[in-house]
Image (cartoon, coloured by chain):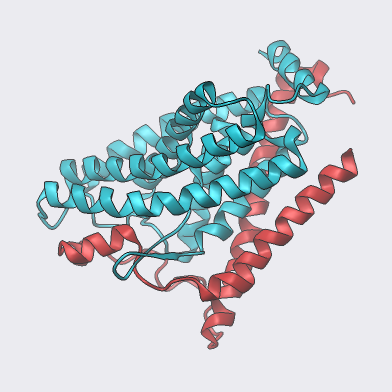
Chain colours: A cyan, B red
Amino acid sequence: MHIPDGFINAGTSLGAAAAAATGLGVAVRKTSAYLEDRQVPLAGLVAAFVFAVQMLNFPVVGGTSGHLLGGVLAAVLVGPWAGAICVAVVLLVQALFADGGITALGLNILNMAIVGSFGGYLLFAGLRGVLPRTVGGVTLAAGVAAGLSVVAAAAAFTIEYAIGGAGGAPIGTVAAAVVGVHTLIGVGEALITGATVGMVLKVRPDLVYGARGLAPEPLLRRGLQSEGAGS
Amino acid sequence: MKSNLRLFILGGLFVAIALALFVSPFASGNPDGLNKVAIDQGFDDTATEHALEDGPLAGYGIRGIDNERMSKGLSGLVGVLVTFGVGMLLFGALRSARARRAPTQVRS
C-alpha cells in the first residue's frame, strides 16, 4: 500500500500532503488534550508494534503479498487521534528504509493514517453501536473495521491515481484491481487486528481506548474527567 | 499498577522485537498489492528512485551484512527501536504540552 515516488504527480501529492498535514494537526491538538501519562509508553509501543507487523508480508492470491496497515489497530488501542500519529510515525521511520516515497509521504499518511485511523475508527464506533457490549463485540468490531479500512485506503489510492496518476493505466481497471486485491489483504488485516485487540483485552482491558464503557474502571473515569477539566 | 504497566510495555516491545528480528526474514517476498497492480497495469516503471535508496537501511537490510535474513531481521530491530524512541519523544512532548495547559493535572 506504500506509494513510491513517481506514481502520482506533484500537484496531487502536494494536495494530499496539505490534507494529511491538516488531519495530523487536528490529531496533535486532540491528542495533547486527552493523553494521560500512562498512554505515552503505550502509544510508543503501538507505533513500534505496527512497524514490526508491517514487515510481515503474508501471501495473497497470485504472487501478491500484503501486510498489516495498522490504522484501526492503533486507533482502537490509543484512540483515533493518537492512532493516526502512530501510523504517521511508522511511515516517517520507513523513509529510512526507502519504503514509501518521500514526495508520496503525504499521500501515504492520508491513505493509511488519516483514512485508516480516523475513517477506520468511525467504522469501528458504528459497529460497536450495533454489536453486543462485550469483549467479543469489541474484538469483532475492531476486526471488521480494520478489514474495511484497507479497502477504504485502496479506494483513496484509486481516487489519487484518477486525479494525478502516471503511466496512463485505465482507471476502471486500476480501481477493480487495487480494491480487489486489498479486499483480500483486508481479511488479513481483520484477523491480525482482531487477534491483537482480543489479546490486549484479555491482559489489560483498561488500556484499550476503544473498549471504554465496556467495564467501568476507576482509571478510565478519572481520565474522562480530567479531559473535561483540561479543555 | 505502575509496574504492571511497565511489564505490559516491556512484554509488548519484546513481542514486536521478536517479530521483526525472527519472523520478518521469513515473510513473503512477493510484491505487495499496490506494486503488483502497478506491474500488471504497466505503471510500475513510473516509480522514481527513493532519495534514501542507497541509505544504510534501504530495502529493510543493513548495508554490509551479507546474510540476507540476518540483515533483514537486524534492520527490523533497528526500525522497532527507532519507532519506539520517536513515538516516546513525540507523545511525551504532547503529554507535557497538555500538562502546561492544565497545571493542576500534573501533580501526582
| Residue found at x 59% / y 62% | B79
Residue B75: % across, % down:
57, 71
Quarter of the image for residue B20 reads: bottom right
Q: Residue at x 47, y 24 (%)?
A: A126
Rendered-image quadrant of the C terminus of chain B: top right
Would residue A69 be seen by someone viewing this image from the given angle? Answer: no
Q: Residue B57 at x, y = what percent?
A: 51, 71
The quarter in which the N terminus of chain B is drawn is top right
Is A228 left, or right, of A57 in this rendering? right
Tell whether A211 sits left or right of B66.
right
The residue positioned 78% from the left and 54% from the top of the image is: B10
Q: Residue at x 13, y 47 (%)?
A: A171
Indicate the position of residue A113 as horizontal and vertical percent values. Answer: 46, 41
Q: Is residue A180 visible?
A: yes
- Between A42 and B8, the one lying in front of the other is B8
Q: Is residue A202 above or below residue A229?
A: below
Residue A201 appears left or right of A189: right
Total numbered labels: 0
